[in-house]
Image (tube, coloured by chain):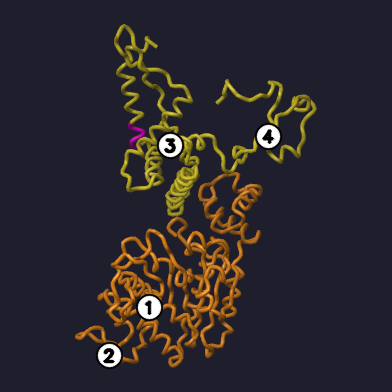
Chain colours: A orange, B yellow
Amino acid sequence: MKTFNESCLMVRRPSVELISYIKNINLNHPVHRFVLYGRKGAGKTCVMNHVMHACYRDNWIIVHVPWAGRLVRGWKKEITESSYKPGRYDVPADGAAWLAHFLHQNQGKLKDLKTTSEYVWTKREKAEAGTPLEEIINFGMTRIKFSSDCVGVVLKELRQQAQTKGLKVFVAISSVNAFFVEWDHVNTLRNAEKKKIEPEEMTIIHNFKKMLSPTWTHGVVVCTVSEVVNMETQREKYTPLYLLGKEGFEFLDPFVPILVPEYSEKEALSNIDYYIDRNWIQHDYGKTEEGKKEIMFVSNKNPFNIYRVCSSL
Amino acid sequence: FQQTARMSQYNKNYMDPVLEKAKLVEGLEENDLRKHRPIKAPNTDCSISPLFYDAEIQKFTNMIMQGGNKERVREIMRRLFENLKHTQVAKYNRANSDEERQGIECNPIAVFHQAVDNCKPLLLSKRTVKGGIAYRVPVCAKPIEQRFNAMKWIIESCRDRTRRIPMEDKLTMEIMDAYKYQGKAIRKKQETHKICESNRAYAHLR
C-alpha cells in the first residue's frame, strides 16, 4: 500500500461466483454457509475479502474474524476464567481488539440497533433493555474484563434482530478450522494449572460458533479453511472434510464448498504485468516473454509464490 | 574473473556451449570455431538462469551463510531485496518531477552492486616482519581481495548490531548507507586508507 500508493484486487472466478450466489439468496431461509478451500497461498482470504467488500458496498453489516488462529494461540496471553459460566475461559485482550475492529468496520450502520433484553454485568453495572449497541461495544472496550461477554451480547442481538429489522448480516471467518481442531505447540493457550484449553472452552469461540449454526435468518456465512492452522501432522490435504475434522464437518454440514484454484495462465500473466507496470519487477530479463514464463514455471502459478519470487527480482 | 586453476577434466580444445535460445535459432557463421571444435556439456545448476543468478550475490550469500544453512540465507537475501525495493519504489512513486525519478535507482541488484563498489578499498595493509620489527605495509588490493573485503566489512558491521533487529533489516540499513557513502562499512574502508596513508614510508618493503 505504501509502496505503490494504491491497493488493488484481482477479480477472479470464485469471487464472481460467490457474489452472484449471494445476490440471489432468499434471506428468509436459515443462514447459508459457504466454505472456500484451496492450496496454501491460492487466494482464499483474498476472495473472501473481495466478497466482503462487495457486500459492504451493498449495505450489509459485517462480522469479520481476521484469522481464527489468533484466538486459539498466543505467546503470553492473559487467560481469565469466565464470570458468566464456570468452566469457560476468556481472553480479554482478544475480545477488546475484536470489538474495536467491528466498530471500525461498521461505523455508520449500528445506530438504530438496541438490545432487547437486560444484561447484568456485576451487582452495580447493568445494561437495560433498549441500550444502543454502540454503548455496549464501548463498555466492552473500556472494561476489558467483560469484553468476551460483550462480544456474545453483540452477536446475539444481531442474530435476533436481523429478521425483525430487515438487516443483512455477513459473517466472514478466516481459517474456520481453528475452532474445531486441536493445537498443541509451545504457544498453546494454557489455564492457571498449565492444562491445555480446548477451543470449545473459550467464550469468544463459543460465541462465534453460534453464528455459524443455521438457527437464524437474514445472513450469510463465508469461511475459509486453511492448512496452516492445523497441527503439522494433519496437513496432508487441503479439502474441507480433512481439515475440519469430524466435529467441524458435522457442525458446518451442509455447506457449499467453493474451490479457489491457483492462477490460470492468463491470471498469472496479468499479475506479472501489473507488477511490471508498477515498477516492482526491476530485472530486465524478468520483463521479457521468456522471463515471465520462467517466473510462472518456478512459482507454479501460485499467487503467494509469485509474490515471493518477484520480490527478489 | 579468470580462474587459472580449475578442476575441470575437459581438454583445452573444448568450447563453451551457447545457452540463449535466440542465438541457437540464428545459427553460426561459416568461420565460427564452434563448428569445428568439440563443445562442453552445459551446466545444470542455478547459474544458467539469468533471472535468479548473479555471481556477486551468490558470493555474498555464501559469505553470510553459517553452518551450511543456505535456506535461511536465501530467505534473508529475498527479504533484503524486497526491503530495498520497497524504499526505492516508494520514493519513486512519490517523486514529483521526472528528473527526480531518473535519479532514483529502483533495481535492488543495482543498488547492491553500487553499495559494494563504494565499500571496496584501493589499498590494504599487509603485515611484514623485517629485522625483528613488524611493519604494516600498504599494498595494492587485487580485485578479488577488494570484493572480499567490501562484503566482509558490510556483514561484520551488521553482525555487530543489536540482535533484536532481524538481519535483513540491518543489511538494508547498511546497504542504503553504503550507497550514499555513509555508515560503518564505509568508515572501515576510510580507516584502512588512513592507516595505509600513514604508513606510506614503508611501501618500498613490499
* Label ID, residue A128: 2
Image quadrant where residue A186 sits: bottom left
Q: How many marks?
A: 4
* Label ID, residue B19: none
Q: Amino acid at mark 2?
A: Glu
| Front one among B173 and A26 | A26
Q: Amino acid at mark 4?
A: Pro
Q: Position of residue A145 (x, y in %)?
A: 26, 75
Residue at the spot 33% in from the left edge and 32% down from the top edge? B187
Front tag of 3 and 4: 4
Residue at the spot 58% in from the left edge and 58% down from the top edge? A302
A128 relative to B29 in the view: left or right: left
- For the residues labelled 2 and 3, the Cα–Cα distance comes to 67 Å
- For the residues labelled 4 and 1, the Cα–Cα distance comes to 63 Å
Residue carrying label 3: B115
Residue A101 sits inside the magenta stretch: no
Give the overall secondary structure of the magenta segment.
Answer: helix
* Label ID, residue B42: 4
| Front one among B2 and B114 | B2
Q: Residues within 10 Å of mark 4 (few under 14, many from 20)?
A: few
Residue at the spot 55% in from the left edge and 77% down from the top edge? A34
- For the residues labelled 3 and 4, the Cα–Cα distance comes to 32 Å
**First of labels 3, 4 by sequence position:** 4
Protein chain holding label 1: A
